[in-house]
Image (cartoon, helix red, strand yellow):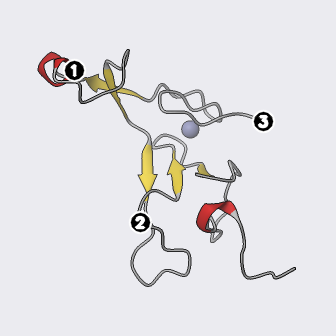
Amino acid sequence: MPELTRYHCGFCDADLTGAPIPKASILKGYYPDGVTHYSQLIGVEYPYGHAERYDGVSENMCPACGVRVGRWSGKVLTNGECEPRYGVDLSVSA
Ligand SMILES: [Zn+2]
């Protein structure tokens, strides 16, 4: 199963490395150790009113091929499909 990561899309082999982060920002400790470049990975947050609204990124998307991968499930999302909050469909009770 290909992977969509911060700096690479395993689905279309796109390099998602962005522009270099200014040295001053790195020196101020704004980024984790070893991080030198921004990423072109798109983090998708669902809007208010959305059934699976979460205050943060719910899915990641490749800007080159458009593949969408759920943040928690790691599952490839098809057209019209969305990532349930925390990757779990809570509407189904045990
Ligand atoms: Zn891609």
Residue that appears at 71% across and 66% down: 88
Tell me: residue 9, above or below residue 59. Answer: above
Measured Cα–Cα span from mark 1 to mark 3: 33 Å
Residue marked by disc 2: 55
Disc 2 crowd, CA 10 A, few/some/many (<14, 14-19, 20+): few
The residue depicted at 57 percent of the width and 32 percent of the height is 9
Residue at figure coordinates x 61%, y 33% from the top left = 12
**What residue would you read off at disc 1?**
26
Say the numbered circle drawn on residue 1: 3
Q: Which residue is painted at 59% across and 27% down in the image?
A: 13
Q: Earlier in the sequence, mark 1 or mark 3?
A: 3
Q: Secondary structure at mark 2?
A: loop
Q: Position of residue 45 (x, y in %)?
A: 43, 62
Q: CA distance from mark 1 to mark 2?
A: 26 Å
Instruction: Name the mark nearer the viewer: 1 or 3.
Output: 1
Q: Earlier in the sequence, mark 1 or mark 2?
A: 1
Q: Hey, what amino acid is under mark 3?
A: Met
Image height check: is 94 above or below 63?
below
